[in-house]
Image: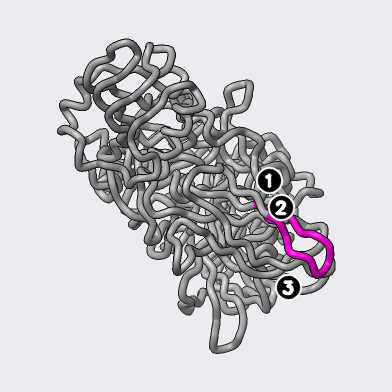
Amino acid sequence: MRRSPVSAALVTLAAAAVVLTGCTWAPAETSSTSSGGGGYAVPGLPDAAREVMNQPQYAQGRWLISVQDLETGETLIDLDGDKMAQPGSFVKTYSAGAAWVKWGPDHTVTTPVKQSGSVTDGTLTGDLVLVGQGDLTMGGRTKPDGSVDFTNLDHNDANPLPGATLTPEDPLAGLDDLAQQVRASGITAVNGDVIVDDRLFSGELAGKPLSPIVINQNLLDILITPGAVGQPATAALTPAVAPWKLDLQVETVAAGATARIEAPRLSATDPSTIVVTGTVNEGDPVLKVFEFDDPATFARTAFIEALGRAGVSVAADPVATNPAGALPDSATVESLPAVARLESLPLAEEVTYVMKISYNRGAQTFICRLAAAEGSDRCDDGMSVAGEIWAGEGLDTLGASLIDGSGLEGNYITPENAVQIQTLMAKRPDSEQWKATLPVLGVDGSLATVQTGSPAAGKVFAKTGTLAGGDAFNGRVALTTKTLGGVMDAASGRELAFTIIVNQGFYDGMDGVFEANDDVGAVAAAIQQAY
């Protein structure tokens, strides 16, 4: 979820008659020209959906909906489907989808460790170069069956949202694998340096760097465990990599009491100390994260420590800044022999991770990788590449106006355009794999807790999107947008593509944002049951 300024939005409602063409089957309990019970008397729209949409918190906002039968192409519901609206993180459908179309679900990237110099009696007189390739997980999220692991509320959202948890995998597993390969190659000592080559691409997202080297999503996890009431809490830092340490100033308060932990920050006197302050409820551990500004230096230190665990000593200072200036040109690095290689998870698993948990930096990394594939080291150049890919697939790209691949403020799409994306993906031979990457209503990812008791649970596969911020004038929360779009297996057996967007809802507190998630899910569930 991203915070955004509030902008006014109004909707003009027009009543229209239900007209069914090209089939003899009609949806159950759909609205007619009558506007009883509120507005949105739209052909094909179920009354149960209208009840949700007409709630007071949305009275000053607007809803946009497009629903299409994937087999026949018939438009079943059209509520301002051709109008632009901000979709939030639903934009990931465009970025991840472009990568999928270009490379396919089985595509992988390989991160090599290159060797410069020569080895004598196990000692390398030269450098080891870890060449970042944009692997999103670097072996740190791989389950025994080879699939990606995730939690429904991932550590990427631990600071703004309560309840984030960690997966059990070792985030340094990939570096350990590489280090062991270095040792198996016959190297036991490095007299030169260890350097991370992160020149494949560069950019920023929300003020933080985008890097082709990604260890633990470039986060340090801080799991805070409460003690007895009135006593200090304890904390564990994961992964434990030098020189990072904690200054924990968190006190335990009674269960149910007001508790708040501030976002971790750097100490004013020690740039390697992370300060965490606040209070935590007894019996309720809390996860927070610290995002570092220099992924290459962190990866370098973590790799040197992994080499040590594998029995390879390194003469260079392990906590020094990554000496990128000592690298030869990229062509020379490319020509060096590789002493270790780490293959990424297949793209289908990377996309699953990005889509299920709405991983912003991962989605934008796909854009960076698209740019790099066309010879550019500027992540921003990947947006036009993505546009060209979709245009080549037949998408009307003028139905979208996008500035990034993650879904920040300033992106716009029409619901019809989003439905067209799903229609194009549904025609592919790997369509079921694509469908499986999407959160499932009432089952997993960002939809895990939405409509769990509905008969539509498990039948709706869709990407969420949220932009929210504050209304300081009235002391309330403004929901700039809430989006849900994907495909559904309707109750009749029909397969539908759909997009639902609501703009400008207002709530007394942040809980309202979660209510909006359920409301959009309820509209989707009503459509799934009616058709």
Per the model, the C-alpha gap separating discs 1 and 3 is: 27 Å
Q: Residues within 10 Å of mark 2 (few under 14, many from 20)?
A: many
Secondary structure beneath dot 1 equals loop
Residue at figure coordinates x 84%, y 69% from the top left: 254
In the displayed image of the protein, which residue is found farthest to the bottom? 473
Is residue 124 located in the magenta-colored stretch of the structure? Answer: no
Nearer-the-camera pick, 410 or 145: 145
Tell me: residue 20, above or below residue 188. Answer: below
Q: Viewed as shown, does residue 67 lie left or right of 427?
A: right
Amino acid type, label 2: Val
Q: Position of residue 469 (x, y in %)?
A: 53, 73
In 3D space, how far apart are the residues under numbered discs 3 and 2 (Cα atoms)? 25 Å
Where is mark 1, residue-wise? 441
At 48% across and 77% down in the image, what residue appears?
6
Tell whether position 230 is magenta.
yes
> Residue 415 placed where, x, y %?
48, 55
Provide the residue designation for mark 3. Answer: 37
> Which range of residues does the magenta coloring cover?
223-234
Q: Which residue is mark 2?
A: 450
Query: In the rendered image, which quarter is residue 224 located in?
Result: bottom right
